[in-house]
Image (cartoon, coloured by chain):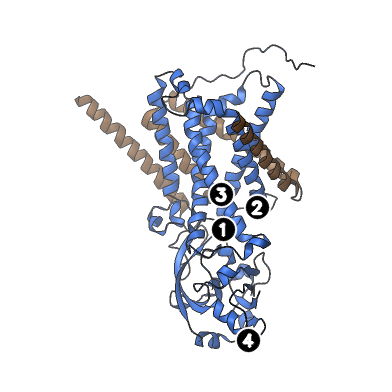
Chain colours: A brown, B blue
Amino acid sequence: MTYRRALGGLGLALMALGGVLLLGQPEPWRIALWLAGAVVLHDGLIAPLVLAVAALTAAAGLRPTGAPRAALIVAGSLTAIALPPLLRPGAPSNPTVLPLDYARNWLLAMAAIALVTGAYLGIRALLRRRA
Amino acid sequence: MPFTLPPPGRPPVTFKGRLHDARTATAIGRWLGLAIVVCFATGVLSHCLQHPPHWLADRLPSRPYWGYRVTQGLHVASGTAAIPLLLAKLWTVYPRLFAWPPVRSPRHALERLSVAVLVAAGVFQLITGFLNTYQWYPWPFSFVPVHYAVAWLLLGALLLHLAVQWPRIRAHWSRSSEGTLALPAADGPDRRQLLTAIAAGVGAVTLTTVGQSVTALAPFELFAPRSPEHGLQGLPVNRTAAAAQVTEASLTGWRLTVDGPRPYLLTLAELSAMAQYEVTLPIACVEGWSKSAHWSGVRVRDLLERAGAGPRAGARVVSLEAAGAYRVMEMGREYAQDPLTLLALRLGGEPLSLDHGYPARIIAPNRPGVLQTKWVGRLEVA
């Protein structure tokens, strides 16, 4: 219990330090707006989107577990980190920043995931039929 | 006055999906917590190296020479790995957003507020840090001080969250913990599949980006903002000569000014005639990318000694760039006196290209890339 209180107290102290550092910035309310926006972005957009994908998957007759779910999770993770290079407006003036063909790479990754998942499900179905 | 609320009705939102439970949250939370702590520690380390307090500047070690490369590679890799982990963690606990009644007591309100701060700081920190590596700044504030401040806010909120949730974390720590055993047994295999899938997601984002710091994994790189295979003279560039407003014309008649008890000037030919040393050192950026390269040039400590500096002198290096936060660079004693620290004239056997800092740049071990000053015009004993 004492350790727990000390940990909580330390947490509050560090939060206060972070708050003081933020208040020292010019126009801290703009930062507060972005912090609140981060919660809205997740709770209002990303999470409902994920739930919608899960509902659609179920409606399509795929059980939202096992390999299809794993494929969606990996594809979603890769798409999330591919968004900045895909969406960043304007070409960087420095040719060594963003040197790859990100759209092609994203399509390759999605195709590879679909291929591996399809092959896995197909082989498993074949083995089950034989057994 | 006691705090009372009207009796709760039926919750407006309910979740039928499985695995939104404390065992799943604990299992993912352990990995996420580890990633955040590694990211925080390596970030604060970089902050200390880039903006050392006065008492620390001369004590910062120049070895191991690969230190900054490893820690900042880890900083960006752990932050990137935290993206799928944070999304998975938030998915697990998402139904708690719709807890009914929304507030049960003042204590419950404070708890929810602290979770809101934790989520805000976590999502904010991963988005700003990740976009920074792509040199994309859509926000109306300065990245470095705000990313630093929110790091403390995030670590604090995380520790508070651990303290608040400690009994539940402990009750669900392992598969055989008492809280885990109280959950529906049928969920066990499903949960393990989910955790394996999340681990695969973490592995996938790591493998497709980490090639920017681990050169051997460059063939797997699909989404990182830098590639060790794309760069002038085999090395990526952070700040181009054009961005620094340095041109060939502005360098005509270049002399290196060395200031100290016995000041002197050197032409490029005179510098090249001094004892040259070869070193293999990485350029390592706080944005995660790094690559090793072969440099040759004059030892900084030889230049300082010739200006009458003692064996414990540090240095101040001034670039010819027009403006920039790192135009004047302070070099602590350990770096200035390290035999690996060069005023480099050549990269990979060729003269430096303009984008790599022609005619002369600093290359020192275990230092942030922004402090490897390019287009050096002046060296002072400090």
Q: Which residue is label 1 attached to?
A: A91
Label 4 with label 1: CB-CB less than 8 Å: no
Q: What residue type is disc 1 on?
A: Ala
- Which is nearer the N-term, disc 3 or disc 2? 3
Q: Are marks 1 and 2 on the same chain?
A: no
Identified at 56% across, 24% down, the residue is B95
Q: Chain of mark 2?
A: B
Nearer mark to the viewer, of 4 and 1: 4
Q: Quick one: label 2, few (<14), some, or many (20+) residues within 10 Å? A: few
The percent position of residue B86, horizontal first and vertical second, equals: 53, 37
Nearer mark to the viewer, of 4 and 3: 3
Q: Which residue is label 2 attached to?
A: B143
Identified at 52% across, 28% down, the residue is B169
Q: Are marks 3 and 2 on the same chain?
A: yes
- Tell me if I can see residue B221 in this picture: yes
Q: Secondary structure at mark 1?
A: loop
Q: What residue type is disc 4 on?
A: Leu
Q: Which residue is label 3 attached to?
A: B41
User: Where the C terminus of chain B falls, by quadrant?
Assistant: bottom right
Label 4 with label 3: CB-CB less than 8 Å: no
Q: Is residue B323 above or below residue A115?
A: below
Nearer mark to the viewer, of 3 and 2: 3
Q: Residue furthest front?
A: A2
Q: What residue type is disc 3 on?
A: Ala
The percent position of residue B57, horizontal first and vertical second, equals: 63, 64
- Find residue A42 and name its label: none
Q: Which residue is label 4 attached to?
A: B265
